[in-house]
Amino acid sequence: MEVVIVGSPEEAGRLAGGAITSLLANKPGAVLGVATGSSPLPVYADLGRRRQAGELSFAAARAFLLDEYVGLPAGHPQSYRAFIASELEARVDFAPGAVQGPDVADDSEGIPAACERYDADIAAAGGVDIQVLGIGTDGHIGFNEPGSSLGSRTRLKTLTARTRADNARFFAAPEEVPRHVVTQGIGTILDARHIVLLAFGSAKAPAVAAAVEGPVTAMVPASALQLHRHVTVVVDHPAAADLQLAGYYRETYTAKPSWQGL
Ligand code: F6R
């Protein structure tokens, strides 16, 4: 696991945006895994700038959302599908239909079958090349709350009161935050070839330290990332505050050979 401590979320956005740009240059049909929430916003802004500058194209690429609320009316501005449409798709040049999210509509097939189909669709697209992730203050990734199976696949989950309170800032009233979500499982996330986890601000410091330096445990779902062969954790100084090896991570990154990339 590589930990990169940056001066600002914008710097993190440039770093992750650079990794995605290199991926697309080598593999125009790459598959991106996209998270919502505030942490990935600097990355999506950076990708938009690079698109405007003609540095990259998503025309042949695909993307899969990490998760989706269950129970919001279609097109609700806080649905994750709508969020990705406005924060990422509107800024770059994905082909129509190239961005897919879990199907949470209560259709005849039902949510469990739609979840299985979602994992199958990701696999059929060749798997995720770079997965962008945030982390919850309780250590969740996607919406895999503490106690989630480390081998889980895409499925229905119930949000904790803490996550609902954390996300209330996006809704008019706290009780509007849905209780249920469909999320890629931890096992689904670990199938991605490269995972870039972003965290900013002091509220994330305990979760980042537990995920990176604590034991691998279902109580801290992000700690499962320690089992993955290519994870980059990009944090600002406040989010890095509880890391015991912060000095070593800084030295390592400063001394990193330029050919290594992220
Ligand atoms: C979002 C997601 C969540 C968020 C996490 C952090 O798709 O799956 O795991 O990444 O809750 O949210 P922010 O970035 O808003 O602090």
Image: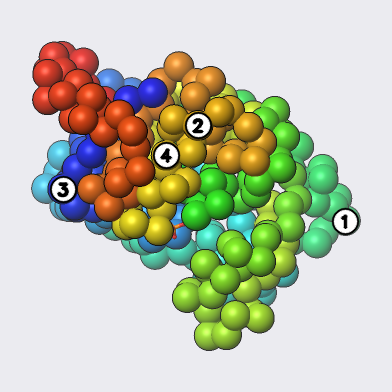
**Relative depth, front residue between 240 and 68:** 240
**Residue bearing mark 4:** 209
Q: Are marks 1 and 4 in contact (CB under 8 Å)?
A: no
In front: label 3 or label 4: 4
- Residue 16: name its quadrant: top left
Q: Are marks 2 and 3 in contact (CB under 8 Å)?
A: no
**Residue bearing mark 3:** 7
Image check: 79 left or right of 169?
Answer: right
Residue 129's x, y, as percent? 43, 27
Image check: 218 left or right of 137?
Answer: right
Looking at the picture, which amino acid does disc 4 mark? Ala
**Residue bearing mark 2:** 214
Residue 215's x, y, as percent? 55, 28
**Residue bearing mark 1:** 108
Counting other residues with Cα less than 10 Å from the Cα at mark 2, is it few (<14), some (14-19), or many (20 or more)? some
In front: label 2 or label 3: 2
Looking at the picture, which amino acid does disc 1 mark? Ser
In front: label 1 or label 4: 4
How is the protein colored in the picture? Answer: rainbow
Give the residue displayed 38% in from the left and 49% down from the top. 205
Give the residue displayed 25% in from the left and 48% down from the top. 236
Q: CA distance from mark 2 to mark 1?
A: 43 Å
Determine whether 128 is above or below 91 in the image. Answer: above
**Relative depth, front residue between 232 and 99:** 232
Looking at the picture, which amino acid does disc 3 mark? Gly
